[in-house]
Image (cartoon, rainbow, N blue to C red):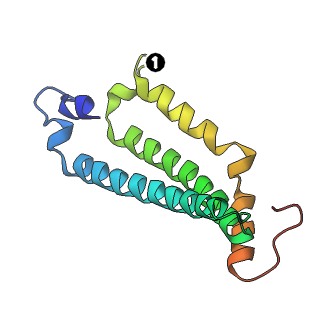
């Protein structure tokens, strides 16, 4: 992002990296990315710790694994979309790597493993209701 941030969008205008919305967007995206990543690793470590102790992964641990993965996919896509919006006109070029990043981020959100049903199932488990049928 730093390369696009240093570019001028139009002659006589300030660089993207000198604009508040760009810098704020970079900060927000970094915070969202690190939060999603921390949740994912926290859930993975909890499940791994259970396995190392010889236990099976509990319904709650499995729910957190699935929820954190779905959250990471959704958050990652939102971050890339936000970066695409604030990066300026250069990203519309077919040769700009942001085109591929945007497509790749959106493809992940289409996978069944990170579908909206994961959030509903997690809500059921977190509310103390029975896990949906077929839900490990």
* Residue in the picture at 20% in, 28% down: 7
* Residue in the picture at 29% in, 48% down: 26
Q: Is residue 82 left or right of residue 72?
A: left
Q: Residues within 10 Å of mark 1 (few under 14, many from 20)?
A: few
* Residue in the picture at 44% in, 47% down: 79
Task: From the top left corner, tell me how far across and down residue 110 is, in percent.
Answer: 68, 42
Task: From the top left corner, tell me how far across and down residue 50 is, in percent.
Answer: 64, 65
Task: From the top left corner, tell me how far across and down residue 54 is, in percent.
Answer: 70, 63
- For the view shown, which residue lies furthest in the left direction? 12
In what element is the residue under mark 1? loop
Count every numbered label the image shows and give the total: 1
Tell me: residue 135, above or below residue 70: below
Q: Is residue 80 left or right of residue 74?
A: left
Q: Quadrant of the C terminus?
A: bottom right
Question: Would you name the residue on which mark 1 appears?
Answer: 94
Tell me: residue 28, above or below residue 132: above
């Amino acid at each position: 992002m730093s390369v696009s941030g240093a570019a001028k969008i139009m002659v006589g205008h300030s660089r993207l990296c000198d604009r508040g919305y760009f810098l704020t967007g970079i900060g927000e995206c970094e915070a969202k990315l690190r939060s999603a990543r921390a949740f994912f690793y926290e859930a993975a470590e909890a499940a791994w710790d259970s396995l190392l102790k010889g236990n099976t992964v509990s319904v709650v641990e499995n729910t957190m694994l699935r929820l954190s993965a779905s959250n990471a996919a959704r958050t990652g896509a939102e971050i890339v979309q936000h970066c695409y919006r604030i990066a300026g006109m250069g990203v519309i070029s077919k040769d700009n790597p942001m085109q591929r990043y945007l497509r790749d981020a959106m493809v992940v959100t289409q996978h069944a493993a990170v579908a909206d049903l994961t959030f509903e199932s997690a809500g059921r488990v977190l509310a103390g209701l029975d896990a949906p049928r077929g839900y490990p």
